[in-house]
Structures are given as structure tokens and as C-alpha cells.
Image (spheres, rainbow, N blue to C red):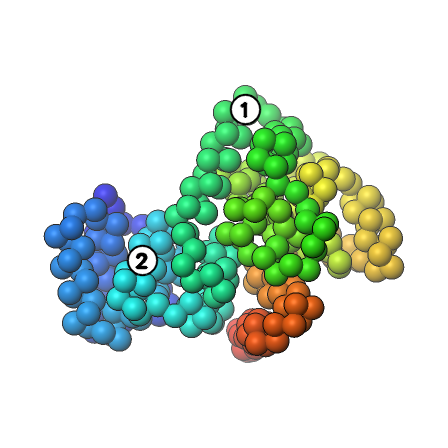
Amino acid sequence: MRRPGKGLGLTRVEAPTFTVEQRKALAGLLDDPSATVRSALLAHFTKHGSESITFLRAVSIQPDRVLAHHANEYLRELNFSDPVTEFRGFIRSLNYELETGALLLSRTVHPDLDIGASCSLLDRMAARCRELIAEPVAARDKCRIMNRVLFHENGFHGNTENYTDPLNSFLDQVLIRRKGIPLSLSLVYLLVADRIGLPLEPVGLPGHFLVGCYTEGEPFYIDPFNAGRLISATEAVAMVRKQSLHPTLADLAPTPVREVLCRCCRNLVNHYTVANDHERARLFAEFVAEFESTYERSIQP
């Protein structure tokens, strides 16, 4: 069990009537399996209403996936949870962590998704990769092992048959269906790589998303949409130019998490528009605007 005061980074949205010590103690009890503790917490959160909502939502957007999962469980049980509001809060927090953001984005359309199950599947694939890695191993060879685990053993692949299906963009659905678009498959690749200690970066080329490795002498790129094919910078540029697009050297640099998640939302605007679901297209357009306006405010002197 996590002890009170451990592993917390609640620096942004804080409940005004909970002291720092109270927040630490409450967070330390969120994953306690005791039914007595759970009942006491539910009673406490119910009594403090809006302060509890603020506290639990702050925990739900922290990078600690276990704490975030339990905070969301309490929000749902107390009927405090509003996934759209949670994601807006995440955008405004400027505290962008890729896995947390991708799962919060998924919850805006699939509020009952099992966050723990998604994280566990990523954990299992990472554990399988570690089984096959005999250190010391070069980054390229680790990527080849990841390719075996993700694309051959688990069957992840690009959804070429129905590319504009909005489900291709939601992390939980990609993990369940084993198919997606370049960006969402790159998310899976990055999250597994992070678990095995392989430093990779998102690379948002125009028209096609890749994963980049910058730890060796010359950067190389991974194309998860095409079974993890390893390509050079020259090959990446040539691939994009075939689509009549004109990438620059800057496009081959790592893409900030903020822009990765914003691009997810832009894709969903387009895909929901194709599906004639204009209400959801408008929702994700609002998220795009929120990302952009929040960023603009953050860089103002």
C-alpha cells in the first residue's frame, strides 16, 4: 500500500479547505484495499463535496497512473466524474504526460473504459520485451525486439481498411482492437518503450506520424503503422514527399506532448466529420482551440 505523503506532485489545482498534510494523507489512502478505509473515504469526500472534486480531479491528471486510476474510480462512484471537464482541466494544467493525456482523451468518449486494464496490457507487452532483451543491446536491436512483440506476437497493425474510423485514435480501443493509425500506434510504441527504459520520441511529420530514436550517432525512425519498419531521416522525408507534402528538417525533431495530443484531437475532428458525427467533431475542435489558447497564454511575457 502507498503510504501517506509518498509519490505526490499536487502542484496545480488544489482544494482550498484541505491542507497539504490532508491532501498527502488522502492520496496515500486512495489505493488502500480495506473496505473500512474505502467507506470512510467515500463519506469524507461526500461531506466535502466541491473540495473533494477539486482534489480528486487534481490527482486524476497526475503522472502516477495508479493514483490517477483510483482517483477516477472515486470520482465515478461518487458521480463526481465528468470526463470532458477532466480533459479540459488536463489541457489547462500545462502538466502534460503522454499516457495520462491519451487515456483522459479516450474517456471523453468512452467514460467507462478500464484504465487499469489498458495500463496492464502495456505493462505485459513491456515485460515480454524485457524477457527477450539480453543487455547490453543497442537501441536498434531493442526496437526490433519491440517489433516482434507488438506486431508479430500481439498483431498490432495499421487500419488501412477503415483509416478514418474514429476508434483508431483512442488508445484504449487501439489496445483492444490491435489496430490504429500512425499516431495512435506510435503512442503504443512509445508507452511500451518508456516501460523498458528505451528513450524514444514522438515525431509528427506532416501527413505521417513516426517514432524517433536520437541516442545513437545518427537518428533513426520507426514506422509503427508499417510493422515498425526502421528508416533513416532521408527515407522518412522521401516517404512524406510521396504524398506531395514538403517536410523540413525541423519536422524530424521530437514533437512536444502538447502537440501530440492536440494532433490526436485534430484527427478526431476530421474523422468524426467524415462519420457525420458533427457534435463530437465540434467537441474535439473545442479541445484543439483549448490547447492552442492555453499554449498562447503560457508563452506570454
| Amino acid on which disc 1 is placed | Leu
**Front-lying residue, 283 or 100:** 283
Does residue 42 sit above or below 211 in this rendering?
Answer: below
Q: Position of residue 87 (x, y in %)?
A: 46, 67
Relative placement, left or right, of 171 versus 90 is right
Which picture quadrant has residue 255? Answer: bottom right
Which picture quadrant has residue 208? Answer: bottom right
| Amino acid on which disc 2 is placed | Glu
**Local crowd size for mark 1, using a 10 Å CA cut-off: few (<14), some (14–19), many (≥20):** few
Number of on-image labels: 2
Q: Which label belongs to residue 73?
A: 2
- Whether residue 142 is visible to the viewer of this picture, yes or no, is no
**What is the spatial separation of the Cα atoms under label 2 and label 1, in whole angstroms?**
35 Å
**Front-lying residue, 111 or 204:** 111
Which picture quadrant has residue 141? Answer: top right
Residue identified by numbered label 1: 132
- Whether residue 197 is visible to the viewer of this picture, yes or no, is yes
